[in-house]
Image (tube, grey):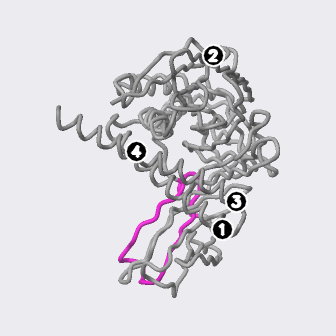
Amino acid sequence: MMRWMQPSVFTAARILAAGILASWSSVSAQPTGSAQPKNTAQSGSSAPQANPAPRADLAARQRALGKTRPVATAESSAEVPAGTVSVTVVGPNDQPLPNANVMLGVMHQDGRRENRSGTTGELGTHSFSSLTTGSAQSYRAKVLHNGATYASTPFRLEVDRGHRVTIRRLPTTRNQNAVLQVLGQTMLEFREDRLHVMQQAQLMNPTESTYVFPKTGARIDLPAGFSAFQSQPVMTDQRLTATDDGFSLSGSLPPGRATLTWAFDLPLDGGELQFAQPVPWRTMGYRVIAASSSGMRLDVAGFPSPEIRESGGRRFFVTEIRKTPQQPPLDRLSVSLSGIPGPGPLRFVALGAALVLIALGAMLAWSGGDRKAALERARTQRKAELLARAAELKKLYLAQEIGPNYWQRNIDEIVDELASLLRSEEASASTETSA
């Protein structure tokens, strides 16, 4: 197991993150279209005024630790008639919002989708009735507001009861200071004649408003010469769309956190490779991980010299930095690799699972929870991603959108990585048994 990833380290990191967040979020985002709070005290009154700073600071610390109220909740309820979804829209202070537009998405097992819409009444509620129950379809309620989307997680209707959904519609902002990158990661893996790069961004909105990305999407540039861009779909309101120079990020980010994952390839010719790309968000921490081999060297500009760490008998380079608002920002990631082994048995095979486990496990541990549970969730998540990718490749191949060589190469890599995951699970079970 990864002894270097001690839970106490990440507990301390979480406390540190909570402690410095107040300074990171000192430039607060002003909600769009919202009025300034009015001073209700009479002129000349000697009544003491409450200082909101401690309360605001406490709220910021809670958000740093991931303790934010969800923007939507959904639960089955015997008080709601069967075949009915009751949606209540409330404001930041839980006040009912009348005349709010509500949508109910219907997703059928055969892939068909449809939408229903309605408007809330005086009590902020609208009910969708005469809906089909059972497992053949799922539902998702959402509210659109000033470019932001507030949505519940998908749910199914039971045959004997309905569903109650509550959606909090928050003010919105387009102030870029509302977005922090709590932890960014780049993972490097060698495959045949290319470098496979997987990147993750754990973004956080420490304000009380929902940040809305630009209408045309925030432009995220990737290194020159990249290819085979992929992104992991998320249930939250962020969408990554491939462009010629990288990808664009659109949608919105409510108070709290969201983790985005994407990957791409870089051509590999010889034993050296350098690439660089901008870091688009204010960043609190960043980590770079690369598979290690004898004679190989990793240098990341501005980062400390990498350490050699082990997991499952594999060796990895790991280097990371932490930033405070008073330090120069991390606005560019520049990576240099040398001594890369050539094709053959020295080239790394099926290391993707181990790399992803380190990254996801570390990111999950940063968010809280013990190491064992974090690694298990990482394995489960990665297996689901691989199976979904295999299904997507099959569709593209049958539609003749990709050729047989590309299809076979990617399927082989998926099979190798699944096998590596299984070996990792067996090694963990063996370690627990011997302990």
Percent across and percent down for residue 11 are: 39, 26
| Residue wearing tag 4 | 421
Q: Can residue 331 be seen in this view?
A: no
The label nearer to you, 4 versus 1, is: 4
For the residues labelled 3 and 1, the Cα–Cα distance comes to: 48 Å
Residue contact at pointers 4 and 3, CB within 8 angstroms: no
For the residues labelled 4 and 1, the Cα–Cα distance comes to: 47 Å
Percent across and percent down for residue 413 are: 54, 47
Would you identify the image quadrant in which residue 194 lies?
Answer: top right
Amino acid type, mark 4: Leu
Q: Is residue 243 above or below residue 18?
A: below
Residue contact at pointers 1 and 2, CB within 8 angstroms: no
Amino acid type, mark 1: Ala
| Mark 2 vs 3, N-terminal side | 2
For the residues labelled 2 and 3, the Cα–Cα distance comes to: 36 Å
| Mark 1 vs 2, N-terminal side | 1
| Residue wearing tag 1 | 100
In the image, is 406 to the left or to the right of 157? right
In the image, is 308 to the left or to the right of 240? left
| Residue wearing tag 2 | 299
Give the residues drawn in magenta, as a range: 71-96
The label nearer to you, 1 versus 2, is: 2
Would you identify the image quadrant in which residue 287 lies?
Answer: top right
Q: Nearer the viewer, residue 418 or 100?
A: 418
